[in-house]
Amino acid sequence: MSRRFPVLPFLDPVRVDAEQRATAHMAAALLLDHPGPDHDAQLAGVREAAASLPGAVRDALLAFVDAVGAWDLTDRQAHYVQTFDLRRRCALYLTYYGAGDTRRRGMALVRFSEAFRACGWQPREDELPDHLPGVLELSARDRGPVPDVLLASHRDGLEVLRSALHGYGSPYAHLLDAVCLTLPPVDDATAARFAALLTQGPPTETVGMDTPLLPFPTVRSEVPA
């Protein structure tokens, strides 16, 4: 994580009710997933749903919709892979920021799986349970405290991801803005962890080669920053 990005100010939260927060999180969950054949329909659905949201959240979502709506699907898919699959600063796996690819991450992933089950849901079979789109979908569907705890306890990683996306000039930065606008203010402890991540990056100790705890690597070989 050697490239330096401007340190963005934390966003002041916007007042949203439970329904608006669920709408914003479901919109971000859909659009942070890999663009598929139904992506145009998803963009149209988010554009329609965004009308019910407070101005700053609505504008952030629509900024993404307007930006990628001008691209064809092949370009959207290529940008997604380039952004999220090949850059460690842009990992969509929340436990990566605090645990890296170390043995500690295995237990962190177990805790995410347990959190899903505590809410009566199962994580997606084709993704790790800390995958941000899945966590945001859980937040949209479950109004209990568990999704709030998952997002709050990994807010430092969300802010690193937001800063990196802005640094790379990716339209996906607007989606992270929309999510962070709906979350509580960043407290001092989270701000300190965020600063440490920017300086030091996630832990780099590798998982034991004989008995890896992770189903697959967080990202592919990183492209040059």
Image (cartoon, rainbow, N blue to C red):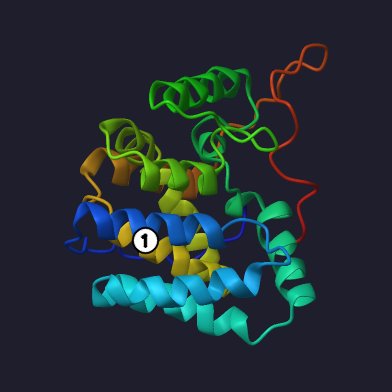
- Please state which of residues 168 and 65 is positioned toward the viewer in this rendering: 65
Q: Against 129, is 24 above or below?
A: below
Kind of element beneath mark 1: helix
Residue 212 in the image: x percent, y percent? 75, 18
Residue 200 in the image: x percent, y percent? 52, 42
Look at 61% across and 56% down and name the residue there: 33
Which residue is most to the top? 211
Can residue 125 be seen in this snapshot?
A: yes
Residue 209 in the image: x percent, y percent? 81, 17
Residue 168 in the image: x percent, y percent? 59, 70
Can residue 225 be seen in this snapshot?
A: no
Look at 71% across and 63% down and name the residue there: 36
- Please state which of residues 143 and 199 is positioned toward the viewer in this rendering: 143
Look at 36% across and 59% down and name the residue there: 23
- The amino acid pointed to by label 1 is Ala
Quadrant location of the C terminus in the rendered image:
bottom right
- Within-10-Å neighbours for mark 1: few <14, some 14–19, many 20+: many
Q: Against 164, is 59 above or below?
A: below
Answer left or right for 52 relative to 112: left
Residue 21 found in image quarter:
bottom left
Residue 73 found in image quarter:
bottom right
Tag 1 residue: 24
